[in-house]
Image (tube, rainbow, N blue to C red):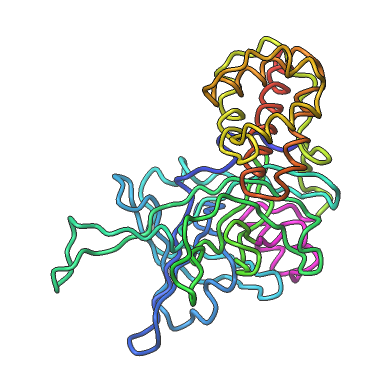
Amino acid sequence: MPATEGPHGLDPVRVAEVMVRPPAGHGAGRRGSGYRVGPAWVLTAAHVVQDAGTATTAVRFEADRTDEWTAPIRVAFASEKADVALLEITGAVPPGVHTTAAGPCSYGTVPDADVMLTCSAMGFPRFKLREDRMRLLDDGSPSQYRDSCHATGLTSALSNRREGTLELAVTPPESDPEPDRSPWEGMSGAAVWHDGTLVGLVSAHHRADGLGRLAAVRVDRWHEQLTAAELALLHEHAGLPLSAAELSRPTDGRPGGARLADLPAGLPLRELDGLVSALTALPTVKDHTNLALVLDSVDPAIAAMSPRSAVLRTDVFGIVRTCLRYQGTLDQFLEAIRLLEGDSTGVARMEQEAMELSRRHRRADESH
């Protein structure tokens, strides 16, 4: 069984900023992201540390926070084929960090099937560049820093099958002002999580896919792509199982999205807030004519019984609450919206909120 979200899932204090600074006169430095998987070990994408032998390479955690720390690293191995690298922290680790942020990770697989799975990743992309006016450079201009990005969305294994990567549908940045540089630059190496398990590492942003799509190398391919020595290092220092058969498997994938037919009719409004917020952001729901078309495709009782309101958010809360009283109609409502909206980041957010709602209810049932 996969681990649950919590201490064994995405932990922000273990998220690393990987900094590669070549010697003076040898080009510009580069940034990437990573994740601490052991007391002195960090996973990242291989291309982040490519040709880093003569560079000054370090990892930084909790930047500009009270418990910030930075340490030099060495590259234990970097596989171009699998685009994964294991870094060893060679500098001193602050007291207490070993015990608070060094436990083993759980690794998972994603099925080659028509399912959509929630995912998240945390890293340091270029579009998160900020000016720090409290810290000035020698010329008087403000210094810059990269803030963190917690990207959430959906993934399916049926995209990028030839490349052999996962496609992550995430909320895109608002703009793409630099045609020669991706706004996602620096996100490479960020650990991708599903249901508390590490299932991949962000590896690329293909510009043709749009701003809301990232590609990630898959953990379940490493046993095919890495050498025996590399797998042994990952097993010893990062906790990767010795065989792909031992990887955790997802429990909340649903063909075409979440299924909400078993939700109780009396769910409190706070439980529905995320789903309603995602719905009210969709163009189909915002447009009165299109929303009426959606409702006409569902059980007629929904349109007739919903306490309609001129305020969109109140109206959608009423529609969702009415759907809960007629089993299966909330799934019909969401399916109609999928058909009209198509593949969009807004629909990805709706799917994520629906899956989270379904998972919370399932786990509540399992705990009783």
Nearer to me, 337 or 310: 310
221 lies above or below 356: below
Q: Residue at x 61, y 36 (%)?
A: 287
Q: Residue furthest top?
A: 266
Asked whether residue 242 is drawn in magenta, I would say yes
Q: Quadrant of residue 142?
A: bottom left
| Magenta part, dominant SS | helix
306 lies above or below 135: above
Q: Residue at x 81, y 18 (%)?
A: 300
- Give the x, y percent position of residue 138: 14, 72
Asked whether residue 38 is drawn in magenta, I would say no
204 lies above or below 172: below
Q: Residue at x 69, y 62 (%)?
A: 217
Nearer to me, 278 or 151: 278
- Give the x, y percent position of residue 355: 70, 33
In the image, is 60 to the left or to the right of 40?
left
In the image, is 12 to the left or to the right of 197?
left
- Give the x, y percent position of residue 62: 38, 50
Q: Quadrant of the N terminus?
A: top right
In the image, is 205 to the left or to the right of 323?
left
- Give the x, y percent position of residue 305: 72, 11
Q: Quadrant of residue 84?
A: bottom right
Q: Quadrant of the C terminus?
A: top right
What is the magenta range? 215-243
